[in-house]
Amino acid sequence: MAAKKTTKTAAEKKAKAKKDAGEKKPKRTSALDAAAQILAGTKEAMNCKRLIETTAAKGLWSSPGGKTPHATLHTAVT
């Protein structure tokens, strides 16, 4: 016996698309936002390299694998 294919109707497809559109993923904190949080909570001046180290240590943000996240943060700030 051949397997019976099931096809979705247009209404079912539209309902699924509407449901999927309503579910939003939580927004990830950017390096810039994490650095702003660090700076807001301290009176100490920090360079970008120190900010990246601090955000990683506090678990606010970590580099997704980039080699120079401090340079990326510097570019975002300027």
Image (cartoon, grey):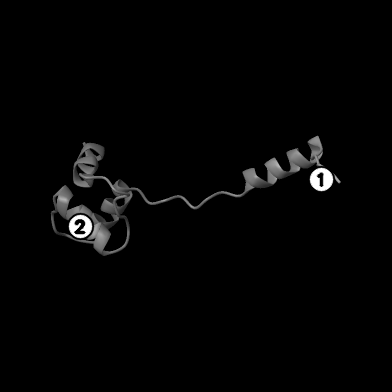
Is the residue 11 above or below the residue 57 in the image? above
The quarter of the picture where residue 75 lies is top left
Disc marking residue 33: none
Percent of width and height locating residue 33? 32, 49
Q: Are marks 1 and 2 in contact (CB under 8 Å)?
A: no
User: Residue at image x 75%, y 43%?
Assistant: 15
Percent of width and height locating residue 36? 28, 51
Q: Nearer the viewer, residue 36 or 64?
A: 64
Mark in the foreground, 1 or 2? 1
Q: Residue 15 vs residue 42: left or right?
A: right
Q: What is the secondary structure assignment of the residue under circle 2?
A: helix
Which residue, as the protein is rendered here, is positioned at the far right? Answer: 1
Q: Residue 24 vs residue 64: left or right?
A: right
Disc marking residue 53: 2
Q: How many badges with numbers are in the image?
A: 2
User: Residue at image x 29%, y 46%?
Assistant: 32
Q: Residues within 10 Å of mark 2 (few under 14, many from 20)?
A: some
Which residue, as the protein is rendered here, is positioned at the far bottom? Answer: 58
Q: Amino acid at mark 1?
A: Ala
Query: Going from the N terminus, do you reach mark 1 or mark 2 first?
Result: 1
For the C terminus, the image quarter is top left
Question: Marks 1 and 2, how far apart in space?
Answer: 57 Å
Percent of width and height locating residue 62? 30, 55
Is the residue 73 above or below the residue 38 in the image? above
Q: Amino acid at mark 2?
A: Glu
Q: Residue 76 vs residue 50: left or right?
A: right
User: Residue at image x 71%, y 44%?
Assistant: 16
Q: Residues within 10 Å of mark 1 (few under 14, many from 20)?
A: few
Q: Which residue is mark 1?
A: 3
Is the residue 19 above or below the residue 54 in the image? above
Which residue, as the protein is rendered here, is positioned at the far front? Answer: 1
